[in-house]
Image (spheres, helix red, strand yellow):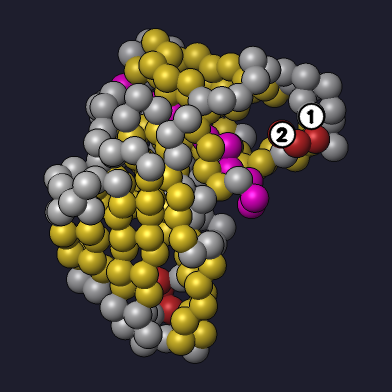
Amino acid sequence: KAGVTQTPRYLIKTRGQQVTLSCSPISGHRSVSWYQQTPGQGLQFLFEYFSETQRNKGNFPGRFSGRQFSNSRSEMNVSTLELGDSALYLCASSNTGGSGKLFFGSGTQLSVL
Amino acid sequence: GQQVMQIPQYQHVQEGEDFTTYCNSSTTLSNIQWYKQRPGGHPVFLIQLVKSGEVKKQKRLTFQFGEAKKNSSLHITATQTTDVGTYFCSNRDDKIIFGKGTRLHILP
């Protein structure tokens, strides 16, 4: 079974631009969650989608948004990029929307210049 | 909002020594999950605990969930170089919360 796939692997953007990241979950998994990882703040929860519906949202500004498609693939969008958005963005899939274990992708390393 | 505090932030041990990381919450947790992230890698699930006082072992790793379900620990016996990485605890409920992790360095 293929693992969680995130694209692109690396991305360089400038302030004010927007970016879209993609995540393909493990086949059969209906839950996809997104995280921002920085050296100082650890792993911070952005949002979780289950069957195309946003179940939960973390404490991030409205510039961060996401969606999930009928095939469970998910995208995350960040608009009006700021320098502080530079981070590793990880997505994880799970076969349940509750307390199941998370399978992480390799992440997208975003650098904002 | 709900938080899980993880200590210590860093730990250096000689190879062969034991290692413990602790996860604490001010509120009762429905479950606790532990993940390991190798340098340059992504978090990998280790275990989930759901019952009060639960203890689970995986070879040299021992995981505990406190009686009050407000704290948890991960203990590694006789560390090896393969244990290097950052260990995260997590609670998955309405939201998914991660501790900031304990980074383990092994000195040869």
B24 lies above or below A50? below
For disc 1, the neighbor class at 10 Å (few under 14, some 14 to 19, many from 20) is some
What secondary structure is the magenta-colored segment mainly? strand
Instruction: Describe the element under mark 2 as helix, strand or loop.
Output: helix
User: Residue sitting at 33 percent across and 13 percent down?
Assistant: A51
Q: Amino acid at mark 1?
A: Glu
Q: Which residue is mark 2?
A: A85
- Count of all numbered marks drawn on residues in the image: 2
Asked whether residue B10 is in view, the answer is yes
* Between A34 and A6, the one nearer to me in the picture: A34
The reply to whether residue A34 is visible in this rendering is: no
Q: Secondary structure at mark 1?
A: loop
* Nearest the eye: A52 or B55: B55
Q: Which residues are magenta?
A: A30-40
- Label 2, label 1: how far apart the Cα atoms are: 5 Å
Q: Residue at x 42, y 86 (%)?
A: B15
What is the quadrant of the N terminus of chain A in the image? top left
Image x and y of residue A25, in percent: 39, 30
Residue drawn at x 77%, y 25% as measured from the top left: A81
Q: Is residue B98 left or right of residue A11?
A: left
Tag of residue B73: none
Contact? badges 2 and 1 (CB < 8 Å): yes
Q: Amino acid at mark 2?
A: Asp
- From the image, tell me which residue sits under label 1: A82
Classify B76 as above or below B32: below
Parent chain of label 2: A
